[in-house]
Amino acid sequence: MLDLRGPSRVAGHLLLALGVFIILAPFLWVFLQSLKFEIDILQGSWIFKPTAFNYADVLYSRRSDFPDNVWNSLVVASGSTAGVLVIGTLAAYSLVHFKARVAISRLFLGWTLIFNMIPPLTLVGPWYLIFRGVGLSGTLTAVVLTHIALNLPMTIWMMMAYFKEIPTEIEEAAMVDGCRRPSIFLRIALPLAVPGLIAAGVLAFVFSWNEFSVALTLTSRHTATVPVAISRFAQQYEVQYGQMAAASVLSTIPALIMMFIGQRYIVRGLTMGAVK
C-alpha cells in the first residue's frame, strides 16, 4: 500500500504556511509603507530608502495628538477591562451556583447572546442621546461604560466555563468548615479561576483597544482613542498614508504584548468545556 502520510504532511505544512502568509502579509505591507516617504508610497515603489520620518511626525509633531490618543485608549481599555472583570466574574459565579431560579438564569444568558449578536453600530445613536442627556457626551467615561456593556457577555460566558470546572467538593468542604459563600468566592473560587480572569481580561482589553465605531461617535478631539486618531489622518483634501501606517504599527504594540502574555490562557478559555 502507498504511504500517503508524507505527501499529506507536506500539503498540511504548505496550507499552514499559506495561512500564516495571508495573515501576516497585510501587517508587513503596512509596516513597509510606514518606512517610506510620501512620494514612494504614491509611486508604489518596492525599492526605497527607509525613513523614520513618519514615526517622528506621529510621535513628536506639534500638530499630532497621537501620544494623547494612546493615553486615552489606555485609560478606556484598562477601565473597561477592570469593570468587565468585576461585574462579569460576580455574574458568572452567581449564575453557576445560585440555581434556585433556573428560568431567570437561562433568560439572562439568552439575553447576553442576543445582545452580543447586535451590531454595536445600531446602539451608537441611543447611547449618544443618553450620554448627551446626562452630560457625559465626549468623555472617556461614556466610552468606558459602553465598552463594558459590549464585552460583558463574552466575559460572563468565559468565567462561567471556569467556575463550572471547579470541583464542588472543594466548596462543600469549605462550607462544612464554616466558610460562607463570599469567603468561598474570594478565597477558593477566585484564585482557582485566575487563568480565566487573565484570558477574559486580555480579550476585553484588546477588543476595547481596537473598537472604533462607538469611540468615533462618543469622543471629541481631546478624548479620541487610537482607532479614531488613525482615521483622522485621512482628511478631506489629503490622506497622510505614511503617518497613518506608522500610527497603525504603533497601535498594534500594546495589543500584541497583551496577546503574547495571555495567549495560553486565551486558548484554554475559549476551548473550556469543549472536550469532556
Image (cartoon, rainbow, N blue to C red):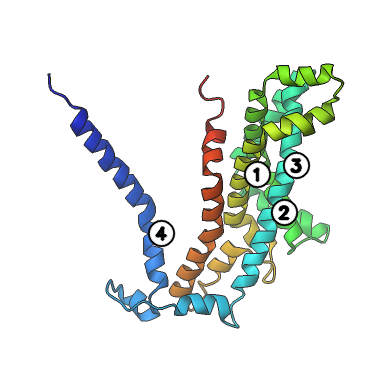
> Label 2 vs label 4: CA separation?
28 Å
The disc, 3 or 2, on the residue closer to the chain's N-terminal end is 2
Give the mark nearer the N terminus: 4 vs 3: 4
Image quadrant assignment for residue 273: top right
Nearest to viewer (mark 2 / mark 1): 2
Q: What is the three-letter code of the residue carrying label 2?
A: Gly
Q: What kind of element bears circle 2?
A: helix
Marks 2 and 1, the one that precedes in the sequence? 2
**Gap in angstroms between the C-alphas marked 3 and 2:** 11 Å
The answer to whether residue 237 is above or below residue 73 is below
Task: Residue lying at the far bottom in this picture: please name it.
Answer: 62
Mark 4 → mark 3, Cα distance in angstroms:
34 Å
Nearer to us in this view, 152 or 273: 273
Crowd tier of the residue under label 1, counting other residues whose Cα lies within 10 Å: few below 14, some 14–19, many 20 or above: many
- Find disc 4 in the rendering and name its residue: 27
Residue 151 — which label?
A: 1
Q: CA distance from mark 1 to mark 3?
A: 12 Å
Amino acid beneath label 1: Asn
Asked whether the beta carbons under mark 3 and mark 2 sit within 8 Å of each other, the answer is no
Other residues around mark 4 within 10 Å, as few (<14) / some (14–19) / many (≥20): some
Q: Which mark is residue 31?
A: none
Q: Earlier in the sequence, mark 1 or mark 3?
A: 3
Residue ID for mark 2: 79
